[in-house]
Image (cartoon, rainbow, N blue to C red):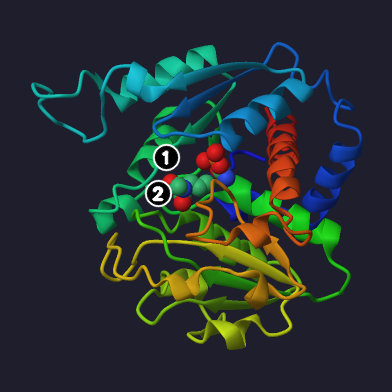
């Protein structure tokens, strides 16, 4: 693998999922593969799981890890040809090349502005690293995608499914703050590549980018969509059409035990209790969010392994 900025960078998805599950059973099998190799993780935004699971994955492979919260470094310029006499002190052209001197693999987290749709969709932060760094880039959640999360989600569903073609429902939930569409986008793209029956449910007007949802069925009736579901993935996203706006906080969209029934409950975390999902679900036996978070390690580890093998 040359890089992991999008799900399509995985060349054989079903094998990759199987290999990740094998790594989980024997996490130190390739503990020499990353010897004398360094991963630099750059965070433009907060993280708990991505930061710790990716570091753990790298260490399981014998890599060294450096973490930089970008806010502690110089303010970066991404525009070409700018006269840098205002707030930015360093251009991405130098920064990306310099980081490539210190690291063999570079992982980046850079959320969207949620104010400028065109700029966010250009993925200028992630793509500038791809363009100017000489080391392979891993996406740790960019403006429009969270492919490491989606891979962990696929691993989790593969581990737990009792059917050849389970019914998976992505259900929008209310949230007081404007959140990215990235997790939902990547989950949808991942499920479209697996043998599952995917349905999306959200309030009218909360459609994700149609270029991503394609012909995946959308049902505005949550109760109907949830019927016979095997896995229910709950996630808030801010409005895509009226970009980045919080237009709906209707508590009726919160996931409850009553609505969930016997389905497994999934969420990428962090999650706001009793806003997105009621306590009874998170504390109940059908919640698989902790297993999902655990699988972040093996998603990152299989990606790092495939990148290391290609260095
Ligand atoms: C982020 C999001 O929704 O994209 C990160 C989730 C992994 N969540 C929050 O900002 C709460
Ligand atoms: N799920 C996820 O990416 O969590 P963090 O934001 O804590 O990394």
The spot of residue 63 in percent (x, y) is 70, 18
* Secondary element type, mark 1: helix
Quarter that holds the C terminus: top right
Image height check: is 250 above or below 190?
below
> Mark 1 — residue?
126
At label 2, counting other C-alpha atoms closer than 10 Å, the crowd grade (few under 14, some 14-19, many 20 or more) is: many
> Between marks 1 and 2, how big is the CA–CA gap?
8 Å
Of the numbered discs 1 and 2, the one sitting upstream in the chain is 1
Image height check: is 141 above or below 57?
below
The one of 259 and 3 positioned closer to us in this rendering:
259
Q: Residue at x 47, y 60 (%)?
A: 275
Q: Which residue is drawn at 21% across and 36% down?
A: 79
Q: Which residue is drawn at 41% across and 59% down?
A: 175
- Residue 246 in sight: yes
Asked where in the image residue 232 lies, by quadrant, the reply is bottom right
The spot of residue 272 in percent (x, y) is 50, 52
User: Mark 1: is the Cβ under 8 angstroms from ligand 1?
Assistant: no
Q: Between label 1 and label 2, give the one nearer the viewer.
A: 2
**Which mark identifies residue 3?**
none
The answer to whether mark 1 and mark 2 are in CB contact below 8 A is yes
Q: Which residue is drawn at 35% across and 17% down?
A: 72
The one of 238 and 36 positioned closer to us in this rendering:
238
> Mark 2 — residue?
143
């Amino acid at each position: 693998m040359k890089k992991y900025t999008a799900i399509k960078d995985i060349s054989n998805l079903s094998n990759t999922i199987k290999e990740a599950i094998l790594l989980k059973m024997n996490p130190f099998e390739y503990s020499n593969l990353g010897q004398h190799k360094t991963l630099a993780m750059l965070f433009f935004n907060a993280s708990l799981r991505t930061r710790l699971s990716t570091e753990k994955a790298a260490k399981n492979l014998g890599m060294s890890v450096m973490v930089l919260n970008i806010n502690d470094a110089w303010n970066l310029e991404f525009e070409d040809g700018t006269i840098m006499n205002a707030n930015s002190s360093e251009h991405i052209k130098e920064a990306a090349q310099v980081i490539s001197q210190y690291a063999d693999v570079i992982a980046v987290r850079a959320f969207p502005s949620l104010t400028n749709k065109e700029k966010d969709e250009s993925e200028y932060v992630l793509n500038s690293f791809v363009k100017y760094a000489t080391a392979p880039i891993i996406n740790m959640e960019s403006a429009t995608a969270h492919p490491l999360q989606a891979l962990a989600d696929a691993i989790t569903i593969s581990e737990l499914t009792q059917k050849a073609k389970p019914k998976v429902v992505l259900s929008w939930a209310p949230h007081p703050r404007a959140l990215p569409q990235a997790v939902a986008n990547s989950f949808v793209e991942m499920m479209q590549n697996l043998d599952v029956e995917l349905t999306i449910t959200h309030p009218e007007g909360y459609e994700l980018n149609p270029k991503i949802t394609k012909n995946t069925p959308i049902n505005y009736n949550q109760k109907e969509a949830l019927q016979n579901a095997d896995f229910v993935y709950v996630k808030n996203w801010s409005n895509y059409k009226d970009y980045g706006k919080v237009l709906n906080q209707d508590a009726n969209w919160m996931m409850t035990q009553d609505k969930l029934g016997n389905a497994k409950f999934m969420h990428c975390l962090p999650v706001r209790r009793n806003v997105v999902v009621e306590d009874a679900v998170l504390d109940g036996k059908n919640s698989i969010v902790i297993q999902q978070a655990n699988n972040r390690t093996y998603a990152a580890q299989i990606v790092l392994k495939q990148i290391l093998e290609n260095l």
